Amino acid sequence: MIFKNKHAYFVKNNTNNNTNTKNFELLNNDFIIEATFKFEEDTNLIQREYCVVGRVGYTMGIFVDSYKNIKWEWWETNDDGEQLYRDIYVTNVDVFNYNTIKVIKEKNSFTLYVNDRKYESVEVNNKLYDYSSSIIYIGASNPYCENNDENWFTGDISDIKIYNSSNETFDDLYLWFDFKINSNFKTFDKSGNGNHGEIFESNEIKKDKNIEYNKFARPPKIV
C-alpha cells in the first residue's frame, strides 16, 4: 500500500458495531509489532521522522528517517509521575528498500529484530506508559497532534502484524494487514478478529476530493 499525501489508517479499541473479537486489553502485557515497508522521502513534508506504525499519546512505535535510521520508541513513567523517553536506534539501514522490523515486548523488555536478525534488547526501567486506550495508527503517529508533529509516513507499507503475546502463532494474532483487500473506507484484517483499519484523511484530502466530486456532480436543481 502506497502511503502519500497524508494518508493513514487507524484501529480503534472497538469497531462501530463492536464486531471485533479482540480489543486493546490484550495488548497491555506482552505483544509483537511487525512491519514490512520501503521508505520514500517526501521533500514537501517538513518533518524529521516518519511513523510506520504506532500508538498515540506519548507515542510508542516504529519510525524511519531519510538518514537511513530506524527506531523503536516508547515512554515510561517514573515514581514522580514524569514521562521519560526511551528508544532502540538502528543506524545505516537501507530504508529505501524493503525491510521487516519486528519488536517483541516480553515481560519487562523490548527486543528489536531487523530482517529476522536480533539487533538489541533493552529493559524497561520504569513503568511503561499506559497505552491501554491509545489508538493504533498506520502511516502516522498522531494526525491530531497539537504541535503539527504528525510524522506522516511516505512510501510502501506491505505488511503489518500485531500479536497479543510474545508468541508468533496465528491464534495470538491481534491484527494482520497486507492491504490487498480494501474498500473506500478501510483495509481488512486478515487475522479474522475484525480489527479492520479505518482510513484517515486529512482536511486537505477531503477538500480536494470534494472539489473533484463537484467537477462532475450535477448542479442543484432550482425549483
Image (cartoon, grey):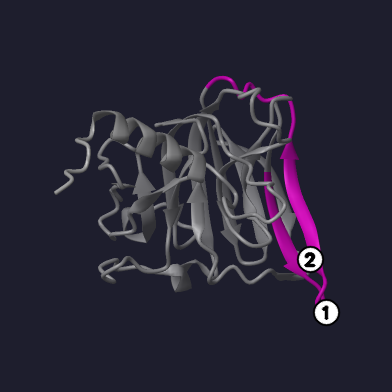
Which residues are drawn in magenta? Answer: 72-97
User: Is 74 colored magenta in this rendering?
Assistant: yes
Q: In this view, does 118 lie to the left or right of 89?
A: left
Q: In this view, does 114 lie to the left or right of 31?
A: right
Question: At 74% across and 49% down in the image, what residue appears?
Answer: 87
192 or 65: nearer the eye? 65
Q: In which quadrant of the rendered view does residue 116 lie?
A: top right
Residue under label 2: 125
Q: Earlier in the sequence, mark 2 or mark 1?
A: 1
Residue under label 1: 79
Residue at the right extreme of this rendering: 80
Name the kind of residue labelled 2 in the image. Asn
Name the kind of residue labelled 1 in the image. Asp
79 or 3: nearer the eye? 3
Question: At 69% across and 61% down in the image, what residue appears?
Answer: 58
Disc 1 packing (10 Å; few <14; some 14–19; many ≥20)? few
User: Is 56 colored magenta in this rendering?
Assistant: no
